[in-house]
Amino acid sequence: VTSSTDWLLGPELAPDTSDPQMAPFYAATAGGVLALPECGACGLALELEQRICDQCGAADIRWAEVEPVGTVHASTLVHRRQADLIHADGPYPIVDVQLASGHRLVMTTVHRSEQQPRVGAPVRVAFRSVGGVAIPAAQLPEEVSPELEANS
Ligand SMILES: [Zn+2]
């Protein structure tokens, strides 16, 4: 699932897996599983940092394994790079994925790409390894997308 060197980020940018708020997330990704928070009372999909349910007001969070599939909700190409932190020598994509579970998750792609993913394209969530930590990354169908950088 993981390789030792990430195409985009150096190992010093690995996320802090001991952060108690995110520990369940990284415990799951380490096993190649995508787990996201949902409301323990009503089941609503919650944001990663969310503590109170928008729908019922409960503060009862449970982490559930979700199917790692969705579609591109929005995407952009990042042209600004900090040379000492970012390995890519060209623009790289950021994808806002609408998961089938109802969650939204922002990530880049599994492999280096300079193409902006098309909105609505199907996505499979796989993992990259940054400093040994598995983080979600979008796997997109092979496609030649038109040069529409204004559409972000
Ligand atoms: Zn709720």
Image (tube, rainbow, N blue to C red):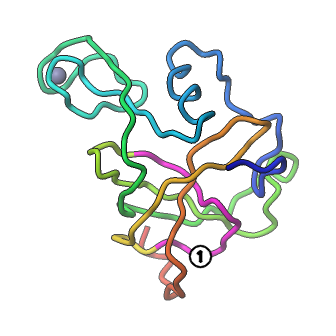
Looking at the picture, does residue 107 appear above or below residue 31?
Answer: below
Amino acid type indicated by mark 1 = Gln
Is residue 77 shown in magenta? no
| Label 1 residue near ligand 1, CB within 8 Å | no
| Quarter of the rendering occupied by the C terminus | bottom left
Magenta span of residues: 105-117
Q: Position of residue 9 (x, y in %)?
A: 77, 48
Q: Is residue 141 above or below residue 61?
A: below
* Furthest-right residue in this view: 84
Task: Please give the count of numbered marks on the rendered protein.
Answer: 1
- Magenta span dominant secondary structure: loop
State whether residue 80 is above or below residue 1.
Answer: below
Instruction: Kindly identify which residue carries mark 1.
Output: 115
Left/right of residue 11 with respect to residue 54 in the rendered view: right
Q: Secondary structure at mark 1?
A: loop
Of 20 and 114, nearer the camera is: 20
Position in image of residue 137 (x %, y %): 57, 53
Q: Residue 140 location, x and y as percent?
A: 51, 69
Which of 104 and 152 lies nearest the eye of the viewer? 104
**Left or right: 28 in relation to 5:** left
Query: Which quadrant of the figure has residue 10?
Result: top right
Looking at the image, is 138 positioned above or below residue 28?
below
Q: Is residue 132 left or right of residue 79?
A: right
Magenta-colored stretch includes residue 112: yes
Task: For ligand 1, give the image quadrant.
Answer: top left
Residue at x 39% of width, y 35% of height: 65
Q: Residue 61's x, y, as percent?
A: 31, 17
Horizontal arrangement in the rendering, residue 17 relative to residue 86 (left or right) = left
Q: Residue at x 13, y 26 (%)?
A: 55
Determine crowd level at label 1: few under 14, some 14-19, many 20+ residues with C-alpha closer than 10 A. Answer: some
Which residue shows up at 75% across the image and 70% down it?
A: 90
